[in-house]
Amino acid sequence: MNYIVFDLEWNQPYANDISFMKRAKMALAGEIIQIGAVKVNSKKEITDSFHRLIKPQVYNWIHDSIHEVIHVDYKDLLSGVPFEQAAREFLDWCGEDWYFFTWGNQ
């Protein structure tokens, strides 16, 4: 049994971009830019870890508040992989026998 604790980091638009998104009828309020996770055994010991930066497809900058939290610049994200690849690699890394755990109020 694998317990997987994971965290997704999202980029978000600036307030003036939200009004543009409404006018353009875009529904994307955020974009996943990072996946991080650890596997934990029944003794609560970390047995493996996973980390991927994701190359943005929608926002061509990183919001200041996101930069403050994850300390990643937009140029760092340019070396990331496409979301589809990151998600596939993450699910492969998870294996077949797992429970997901995450945290946050968002």
Image: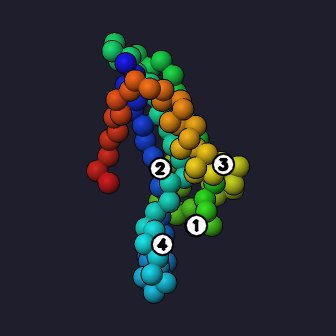
Mark 2: few, some, or many residues within 10 Å (few <14, many ≥20)? Answer: some
Query: Residue shown at 40%/23% (left/top)?
Result: 97
Query: Residue shown at 63%/67% (left/top)?
Result: 60
Mark 3: few, some, or many residues within 10 Å (few <14, many ≥20)? Answer: some
Question: Distance of mark 4 from mark 3, alpha carbons?
Answer: 22 Å
Q: In the drawing, what numbered circle is on residue 14?
A: 4
Looking at the rendering, which quadrant does residue 6 occupy?
A: top left
SS at circle 4: loop
Residue in front for this viewpoint, 17 or 101: 101
Residue, disc 2? 9
Check disc 4 and give the amino acid type: Tyr
Residue in front for this viewpoint, 55 or 67: 55
Which numbered disc flags the more N-terminal residue, 4 or 1?
4
Q: Does 93 sit left or right of 39 as displayed?
A: right
Question: Quadrant where the C terminus lies?
Answer: bottom left
Mark 4: few, some, or many residues within 10 Å (few <14, many ≥20)? Answer: few
Residue, disc 1? 58
SS at circle 3: loop
Which numbered disc flags the more N-terminal residue, 2 or 1?
2
Which numbered disc flags the more N-terminal residue, 4 or 3?
4
Residue, disc 3? 80
Instruction: Residue 53: give x, y in percent of width and height.
Output: 60, 46
